[in-house]
């Protein structure tokens, strides 16, 4: 069941709650409200339940929006972006670490795509620049060698975000 919930976030309606490197499980819900036995027109409760990490739950989050206005009537557009922001705070507050084995997100044209950062420490700046083409590069210091990099090699970073290279001499 937890794997199924994780697939909702990676592959289904919960994609806006996806956090690269963290196993998030979730389920969206859209319910039309009833009054006196009749469905109300245009009156819904949008909800999203999530768990982090999905394979070893440490926190559960439930969000419900009662009759949201001026929005698409789908929880995947209303509740999941809010849940993602709260889940990031939960991950930070509980010190939840990144894990292997996350279901890879089914990316669409509007999503940020993440790539694993290669190790360029000790490389010539010109060579490092050739392999770091997915990201912006900010240089600190002077010299022709990469002394250190941030984020570290092996981390995943969204395309077009910035990698900082500390430069020095041989």
Image (tube, rainbow, N blue to C red):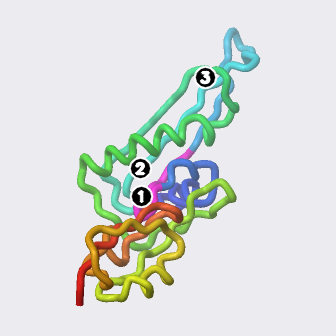
Image x and y of residue 26, in percent: 50, 49
Camera-near label (1 vs 3) is 3
Q: In the displayed structure, would residue 168 be above or below residue 75? A: below
Q: Label 2 vs label 1: CA separation?
A: 6 Å
Image disc number at residue 54: 1
* Residue at mark 2: 51
Q: Residue at x 39, y 40 (%)?
A: 86
Q: Secondary structure at mark 3?
A: loop
Q: Secondary structure at mark 1?
A: loop
Q: Residue at x 61, y 22 (%)?
A: 68
Q: Residue at x 48, y 37 (%)?
A: 82
| Residue 25 on the magenta span | yes
Image x and y of residue 77, in percent: 62, 39
Which span of residues is magenta-colored?
19-27
Image x and y of residue 30, in percent: 64, 34
16 or 129: nearer the eye?
129
Q: In the displayed structure, would residue 129 be above or below residue 111? A: below
Q: Main secondary structure of the magenta part?
A: loop
Q: Residue at x 46, y 56 (%)?
A: 19
62 or 163: nearer the eye?
163
Task: Count the marks.
Answer: 3
Crowding at mark 2 (Cα within 10 Å: few <14, some 14-19, many 20+): many
Crowding at mark 1 (Cα within 10 Å: few <14, some 14-19, many 20+): many
Residue contact between numbered discs 2 and 1, judged by CB atoms under 8 Å: yes
Q: Label 1 vs label 3: CA separation?
A: 28 Å
- Which image quadrant is residue 60 in? top left
Image x and y of residue 103, in percent: 52, 67
Q: Is residue 10 left or right of residue 19?
A: right
* Residue at mark 3: 68
């Amino acid at each position: 069941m937890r794997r199924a919930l994780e697939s909702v976030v990676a592959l289904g309606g919960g994609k806006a709650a996806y956090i690269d490197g963290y196993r998030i499980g979730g389920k969206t819900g859209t319910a039309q409200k009833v009054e006196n036995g009749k469905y109300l027109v245009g009156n819904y409760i949008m909800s999203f339940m999530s768990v982090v990490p999905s394979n070893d739950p440490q926190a559960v989050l439930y969000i419900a929006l009662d009759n949201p206005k001026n929005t698409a009537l789908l929880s995947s557009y209303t509740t999941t972006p809010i849940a993602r922001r709260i889940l990031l705070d939960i991950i930070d507050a509980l010190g939840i670490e990144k894990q292997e084995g996350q279901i890879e997100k089914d990316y669409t044209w509007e999503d940020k795509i993440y790539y694993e950062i290669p190790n360029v420490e000790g490389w010539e700046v010109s060579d490092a620049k050739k392999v770091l083409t997915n990201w912006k590069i900010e240089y600190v210091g002077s010299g022709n060698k990469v002394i250190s990099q941030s984020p570290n090699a092996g981390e995943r970073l969204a395309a077009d975000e910035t990698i900082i290279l500390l430069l020095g001499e041989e």
